[in-house]
Image (spheres, rainbow, N blue to C red):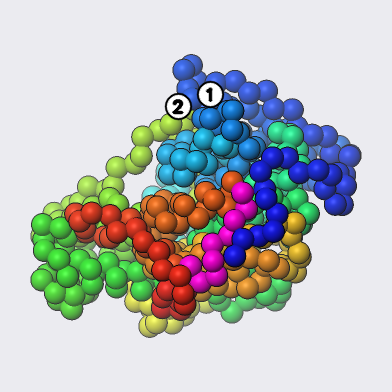
Amino acid sequence: MTCSTVLTGQDLAVAGGAPTPSVPVPQLEWSPCVRGSAFDCATAKVPLDYDNPSGRTIELAVVKRKATDPGRRIGTLFFNPGGPGGPGTVQMPQNYERFPREVRERFDIISWDPRGIGSSTAVNCFASPEEAADWSAGKAAGFPVGEKERAAFIAAYKDLARRCERRDPELLRHVSTTDTARDLDQLRRAVGESRLTYQGISYGTILGATYANLFPDKIRAMVLDSNIDPEAWTNHASDDDPRLTTFLRMGSDRTAAATLDQFLTLCGSTTTAHCAFSAGSPQATRDKFDQLMQKLRKHPVGAWTYAGTVADVVNSLYIVHPGWRDLAGRLQNLWQGRAAEPSPLPPPPAVPHPNPYLGEEQGAAVLCGDSPNPRDPNVYHGLEEAAAARAGDAGRFWTWAVEGCSTWPAVAADRYLGPWNKPTAHPVLVVGTTYDPSTPYTNAQAMAKQLANARLLTHNGYGHTALLNPSSCINTYTGRYFIDGTLPPAGTTCRPDTPPFSVSKPIGGVATGGGGMAGTVS
């Protein structure tokens, strides 16, 4: 099935008319980000508060890569790399080659650091990087273990909240997903697009869903990859003190546990030449992992504590190649009592600020202001034990990931709480990965169901986002959809190009049918 409207070229007049004229369109003065760079940079000025557009303004750092085949250019694709807290001016250039070739040929690709983040007007609650590092060193890595660490962890985030409230309380109330969706509409206007073409991954999916319901007549094409269930994000549009955290409502603990189990199963199904941590069988490898966690609880290896290692494990499951093989090597080193080297960071891109300050408070300002979490720090230990009972070590990690929200000093002034089913000018393409350590496949199913007109495309694979865990099958469908609006057939399932721990030829394939492994990570 294809959607009825071909999407090439500019649309004519859009139903609903132009946005409120009282907010001037930002002027983008593009220039090469650095000498010789293939990327162009600009700065956009937008209102801090869209309800008071003549008041304080803030700046957004914006980056663009022009279409590589300008003669066949269709328009502009806007990209949000997730987070919340992901700096688009860094992460889009780093991941530019991951976009399908035909998309790079036919679209300018633009990203930006959302308000509060990175090189835009940023939330920064410390006087210096040294002060920030000292604060971070005062709490346990990963999550707290034991009563003493829990008290220090809670105290650290109370201290962070006090610092942030002192620095710029007004900014903290205006870094919501809704504010950023309005910024995105301003950027769309600034480049002269009558409708939005957009790809959001992870947190970028809730941003996309918010935009689609604030500006439903402005949707040209939208891909939402590795989704957050809007009802989970908003606590079902309720401000009552929630029983669970954002990530426990989403099921991040369960899907991380299921993905870790796949990692250990596949590792144990191959040899140590392919997975250094293999113990010769899936069960033996799972047992070995449990024994390693128990050993680390009693005897850390250098700086590698039990909780810090669990955090590294969950984060290392995001990118299968080379993340899974590298993780297996680190776990084997720890098993042998050797301190492991952390994964190297990707090389900085050629932009003016390749390493902007990205303190924890930036993502927290968006998440805590936007999404309700329990306000009593003392309930988190009980939540942790319940999550650990259903999801093991990963449950502990995901419970404490938002404890800072319990004492956060601000609630966003402008939050979109639904409804999520406003009919959009064109259908939305929702992509979900079956074994994702962060955003469960069930959340992609929920997103596709809650949006008024959406098609679910299943990535029967591993890792966080199909964009960063390549599947030529997924790329074929997303590329075709961006270019001419063609949706994949209902029930389409894709596989990754290369399985984990594999040196075999790529297997990227497609099966049309019952939605692959629907529900296996719920």
Q: Looking at the image, which residue is at 63% across and 37% down?
A: 74
Residue situated in front as seen by the camera: 302 or 350? 350
For the N terminus, the quadrant is bottom right
Q: Which residues are magenta?
A: 484-492
Pinpoint residue 116: horizontal percent, then vertical percent: 62, 44
Query: Please, which residue is most extreme toward the top here?
Result: 35
Q: Is residue 495 above or below residue 291?
A: above
Q: Looking at the rendering, which quadrant does residue 279 occupy?
A: bottom left
Q: Looking at the image, which residue is at 51% across and 30% down?
A: 68
Q: Are marks 2 and 1 in contact (CB under 8 Å)?
A: yes
Residue situated in front as seen by the camera: 486 or 356? 486
Q: Which residue is mark 2?
A: 350
Q: Gap in Å between the C-alphas at discs 2 and 1?
A: 7 Å
Q: Is residue 284 above or below residue 78?
A: below
10 in magenta: no
Q: Looking at the image, which residue is at 63% across and 73% down?
A: 449
- Mark 2 or mark 1, which has the lower sequence index? 1
Q: Looking at the rendering, which quadrant does residue 406 occupy?
A: bottom right
Q: Please give the label number shown on residue 33.
A: 1
